[in-house]
Image (cartoon, grey):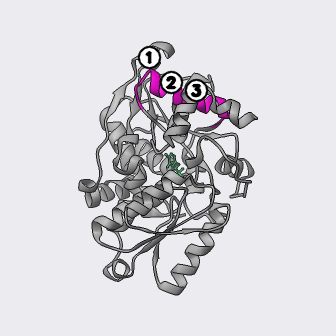
């Protein structure tokens, strides 16, 4: 079986380290006190472009050959991958086309446009957007950079795991936001490679957790996509998944699912106690602890994976009106 090793991740870091921010890992006084173990926050929402996706995109762009670079890159994206790829492509001076479904929030689409990428809005799911990607690969010869199921992308996301071990060498548990599993696979490979006893727990939302459904079924399955506060965790794992499904199956110790109210509580805690603005997907680690769905034993690291939330939505969550509106 093809996989991504610690060695691949270290090699990826050497290829693109100067393109990304090595984000801080900081102790959370409030969560450490509450749970009686050291809890650290990996502040990856402060990454350039507002999410960890820049690591995978930079890794993939760095591994393209000259012909690929001349023709350009294309991707389907729930927003953050597209934004990251647009940024990474612009740094290299190459063309980028980003295909998205109608569910992607307008603020994310606008950011990608501003980075100089061409935008295609197609259908109502990540799978619909992927059909357009496949067409552009065949008809225009663009190089596809998948959001998660790709060795260079997973190796790039894994560099975040290297930084976690460097910051918290005695880490016992890492909580990783989980969608297609590129982040979880890369982080798990890095952390397990350096500290085999560490536990890696994936966190998704109840509304449309494709990886959880696939792990339960023992093979990639499709789930219905639904609106959720953790919009960056939407989308399927791909029925022809090559890498991230198997790596998550082999490397994750557990996967837990959160309600919308629990995710909202995570966003509120991040802001009021930690003074950090995070999107729903970035808040799920905090939310899982607060909801009692993960009981931390030993030093624990939560990955705040992104901050690209619509600020009007963020305000209404803080005011407690977002849930009421969604329920109505
Ligand atoms: C993409 C994304 C995730 C999930 O990453 P996968 O590799 O698809 O599992 C989590 N948080 C944020 C902010 C993201 O953009």
Front-lying residue, 95 or 221: 95
Contact check, label 3 and label 1, Cβ < 8 Å: no
Q: Residues within 10 Å of mark 1 (few under 14, many from 20)?
A: few
Contact check, label 2 and label 3, Cβ < 8 Å: yes
Q: Does label 2 or label 1 sit earlier along the sequence?
A: 1
Q: Quadrant of residue 13?
A: bottom left
- The residue that mark 3 highlights is 265
Magenta residue check for 309: no
- The residue that mark 2 highlights is 269
Name the side, left or right, on which 247 lies relative to 32: right
- The residue that appears at 61% across and 25% down in the rendered structure is 320
- The residue that mark 1 highlights is 30
* Image: 36 above or below 193: above
Magenta residue check for 270: yes
- The residue that appears at 60% across and 33% down in the rendered structure is 263
Q: Which residues are magenta?
A: 256-276
Location of the C terminus by quadrant is top right
> Please, what secondary structure does the residue beneath circle 1 have?
helix
Distance from the alpha carbon under mark 3 to that under mark 1: 14 Å
Q: Position of residue 308 (x, y in %)?
A: 46, 45
Q: Position of residue 156 (x, y in %)?
A: 39, 56
- The residue that appears at 29% across and 52% down in the rendered structure is 20
């Amino acid at each position: 079986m093809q996989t991504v090793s610690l060695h691949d991740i270290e090699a990826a870091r050497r290829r693109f380290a100067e393109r990304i921010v090595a984000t801080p890992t900081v102790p959370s006084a409030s969560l450490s006190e509450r749970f009686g173990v050291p809890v650290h926050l990996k502040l990856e929402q402060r990454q350039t472009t507002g999410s960890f996706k820049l690591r995978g995109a930079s890794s993939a762009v760095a591994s393209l050959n000259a012909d690929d670079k001349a023709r350009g890159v294309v991707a389907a994206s729930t927003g953050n991958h597209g934004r990251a790829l647009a940024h990474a492509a612009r740094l290299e001076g190459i063309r980028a086309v980003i295909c998205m479904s109608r569910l992607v929030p307008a603020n994310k689409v606008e950011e990608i446009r501003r980075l100089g990428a061409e935008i295609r809005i197609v259908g109502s799911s990540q799978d619909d957007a992927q059909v357009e990607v496949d067409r552009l690969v065949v008809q225009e010869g663009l190089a596809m950079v998948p959001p998660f199921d790709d060795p260079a992308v997973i190796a790039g996301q894994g560099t975040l795991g290297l930084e976690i071990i460097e910051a918290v060498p005695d880490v016992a548990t890492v909580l990783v936001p989980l969608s297609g599993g590129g982040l979880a696979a890369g982080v798990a490979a890095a952390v397990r490679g350096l500290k085999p006893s560490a536990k890696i727990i994936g966190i998704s939302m109840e509304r449309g957790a494709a990886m959880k459904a696939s792990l339960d079924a023992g093979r990639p399955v499709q789930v219905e996509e639904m609106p959720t506060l953790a919009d960056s965790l939407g989308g399927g794992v791909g029925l022809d998944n090559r890498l991230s499904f198997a790596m998550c199956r082999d490397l994750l110790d557990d996967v837990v699912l959160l309600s919308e109210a629990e995710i909202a509580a995570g966003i509120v805690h991040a802001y009021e106690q930690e003074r950090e603005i995070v999107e729903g997907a970035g808040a799920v680690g905090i939310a899982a602890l607060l909801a009692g769905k993960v009981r931390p034993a030993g030093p624990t690291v939560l990955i705040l994976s992104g901050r690209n939330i619509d600020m009007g939505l963020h305000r209404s969550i803080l005011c407690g009106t977002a849930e009421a509106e969604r329920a109505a």
